[in-house]
Amino acid sequence: MIAYFTNLASLGAIFCILAATLNVAVGYAGIFSVAHAVFFGLGAYAGAQVSLLLIPDALVAMVVAALVAGALSLCLALPALRVRGEYFVAASLGLQMMAVTLFSEAKTLTGGIGGLTGIPRPHILGVEVSTLPVALAALALILLATALLMRGSFGRTLQAIRDGESAAEALGKNVAAAKALAVAFACAGAGVAGALFAMHMQFVNVESFNLDQSVLIMAMVIIGGTGTLWGPLVGAVILLSLPAGLAFMPFIPSTEVGAVQQIIYGLAMTLLMVFRPAGLVGDLSRGKSHA
């Protein structure tokens, strides 16, 4: 039982990183992307290859994963950042669909449909460690960096873009650069989560990085509260706890847990958009989202 809860807590910390980093793009910059799982996958594959081919060091794997995901996010996102609103959502959806195919076909790097197996457990300075403390430390650093950035001029620029991109441009803000940096920061964080996920699971394949995963991460941010520091964490904990709770309900067949889970996700997001558009945490501040 202890191992079960430790595993659940480790996955919870990893998904909190994903939700917190996506929130930088969605909540603070107003860039709605449904491709966050793509960069989660890039980080996972990069971290896995570092562990398999070079050294099973968690710090090295996370740094490499962050660099790969952050760099590729700029290469892929800069053209898409020329469009706004629903057009960027459509562009990110296309990226998500294309990435799943590439992950499946690039067998040398990703192992194809079968994925990569035998990934070593995380090590630090040659000593094997549990994923949980490493993931919690990474989450704390990302939250600290987010809080500091959002309280500075960069954060104010992002929020100006979110509230009125044309007005921000008129005030002389470099909108393209700010949006690109926000996306790079968010995707680099997703890469860190991916490296941790790969070392924790010791196996990765394309099924963990599809559209459903991106929608799940987006749901965590929206349900918890966009533009808040703690909201995405609340959303991640709630949505990750839901499957475990449903599994213990005897009147729900085990084969139907996934379907019931998706219904609850959709219903929760719909009700929140109607009655608490700022999310659970944002609503506590009378609908205002702040860190």
Image (cartoon, helix red, strand yellow):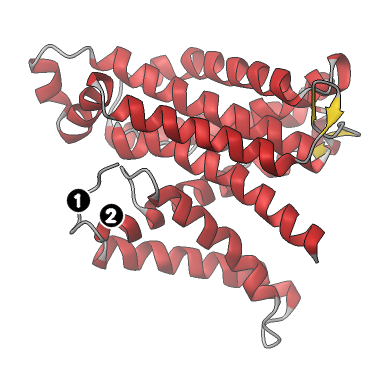
Q: Read off the residue under disc 1.
A: 288
Per the image, label 1 sits on a secondary structure element best described as loop
Q: Is the N terminus in the top left, top right, bottom left or bottom right quadrant? A: bottom right
Packing grade of label 2 (10 A; few <14, some 14-19, many >=20) is many
Q: Is residue 237 left or right of residue 9?
A: left
User: Compared with residue 276, is residue 282 higher up or lower down, i.e. above or below?
Assistant: above
Number of marks in the rendered image: 2
Q: Residue at x 79, y 62 (%)?
A: 2
- The answer to whether any part of residue 97 appears in the image is no
Q: Are marks 1 and 2 in contact (CB under 8 Å)?
A: yes
Q: Is residue 65 left or right of residue 70?
A: right
Q: Is residue 57 above or below residue 193?
A: above
Circle 1 crowding by C-alpha within 10 Å: few under 14, some 14–19, many from 20: some
Q: Which residue is mark 2?
A: 282
Residue 171 image offset from top left, x and y in percent: 8, 16
Q: Nearer the viewer, residue 118 or 96?
A: 118
* Quarter of the picture holding the C terminus: top left
Q: Position of residue 211 (x, y in %)?
A: 57, 44
Q: Amino acid at mark 2?
A: Gly
Q: Which residue occupies the extreme right position in the image?
A: 118
The percent position of residue 146, horizontal first and vertical second, equals 39, 31
> What amino acid is found at the position of numbered circle 1 in the picture?
Lys
